Image (cartoon, rainbow, N blue to C red):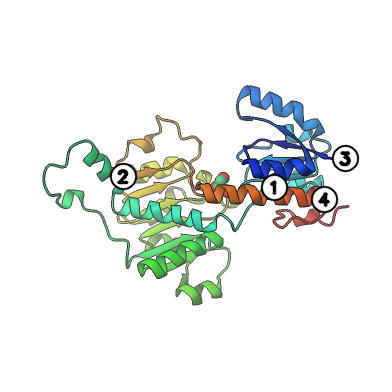
Amino acid sequence: MKKHVVLYKTLSAPLMARLEAVAQVTVVENPKSQDGLAHLRDALPEAEGLLGASLTLDADLLSLAPRLQVVSSVSVGVDNYPIDELTRRGILLTNTPDVLTETTADTGFALIMATARRVVELADWVRDGQWKQNIGPAHFGTDVHGKTLGIIGMGRIGEALAQRGHFGFGMRVIYHSHSQKPAVDARFGAEYRNLDALLQEADFVCLTLPLTAQTQGLIGAEQFARMRPETIFINIARGKVVDEQAMIEALRSGQIRAAGLDVFTQEPLPADSPLLTFDNVVATPHMGSATHETREAMAACAVDNLISALNGQRPKDLVNPETWPRG
Ligand code: DGY
């Protein structure tokens, strides 16, 4: 008999066909809306597999799913799942690393370029019809090439950013991570720093680390105070790694030069967020992995992980290996 899967993300027709070949699929649209959530709650009691993204699967929702065997997330980040509780119940959690690494690093570099060279601000200025004579120093940006790229979190995405900085822009790479990585040092001429030293030294401070209990609020007022008026702050990790109010103060006081932000404490970012009042902030809508190719690759990876798990095989991207082999 086919297993029951609750799908709360739109899949392409080929992926949907692949999933439906092995599972009985209940599609829940927009699970964050009131109706969608009610539908999800109705579907959970039968669910043996879940597939989707961006939903906070809290203890209440999980308690409605006694038959659940696997949660397949279409994301690399898994901060929205109660991992300990899933593990305690023997429920497999899978994610989609690797396939989004390069695209997310591209987004990081887009924010580096946009903030340093004031691309969005000046493009808006041209669009407003304000370009009436050659621009002068008031509109100049700052160089990216040859500067010091500081990466906090040297995982796959951190490495892909280092590659772009080192080989593409001749940047000096420094990084902070839970451990020093000799292979990274050798490949990019990178140098390990403790957090304070990195914050003081980097021209670009880039966050690429996961949100966990240890990293929540890692960058607050004390950390912004260590940065310099030339520092550009880039966050492609998770909003909650940063104390957003402290970042707003750092921008307001000129403690940092600019910020390129793809992630926020509250998403979608409220239209009245003070962050949107700064010309030197480039805010994008959590689009790190958002290209047609990469989102399809992520969904394919999630479908494969789900199918493996439902077939009793170890999925490739198992986040909680303690659940394997099945008891
Ligand atoms: C990820 O894959 O974690 C992206 O940030 C989307 O949530």
Residue beneath disc 4: 311
Location of mark 2 (residue): 120
Measured as percent of width and height from the top left, residue 281 is found at 35, 44
Mark 2: which secondary structure? helix
Left or right, 50 with reference to 197: right
Asked if the residue at tag 4 contacts the one at tag 2, i.e. Cβ–Cβ closer than 8 Å, the answer is no
Q: Quadrant of the N terminus?
A: top right
Which mark lies nearer to you, 4 or 3? 3
Q: Which residue is mark 3?
A: 1
Taking the spot 37% from the left edge, 48% from the top edge, the residue there is 259
Residue shown at 21% from the left, 53% from the top: 140
Please, what is the three-letter code of the amino acid marked with disc 3? Answer: Met
- Mark 1 residue type: Val
Circle 4/circle 3 CB separation < 8 Å: no
Q: Can you identify the residue that label 1 sits on? A: 303
Residue at the extreme bottom: 186
Mark 4–mark 3 Cα distance, whole angstroms, equals 12 Å
Position of residue 109 in the picture relative to residue 265 (left or right): left
Inspect the image, locate mark 4, and give the three-letter code of the amino acid beneath it.
Answer: Asn
**Crowding near the residue tagged with mark 1, few <14, some 14–19, many ≥20 C-alpha atoms within 10 Å:** many
Between discs 1 and 2, the one toward the N terminus:
2
C-alpha distance separating marks 1 and 3: 19 Å
Numbered tag placed on residue 31 in the rendering = none
Badge 4 density bin: few <14, some 14–19, many ≥20, Cα 10 Å: few
SS label for mark 3: loop
Relative height, residue 117 to residue 80 (above, below)? below
Residue 52 in the image, given as x and y percentages of width and height: 65, 40
Residue 90 pos. (x, y %): 82, 48
Q: Residue at x 40, y 29 (%)?
A: 272
Q: Disc 1 and disc 2: Cα gap in Å?
A: 37 Å
Q: CA distance from mark 4 to mark 1?
A: 12 Å
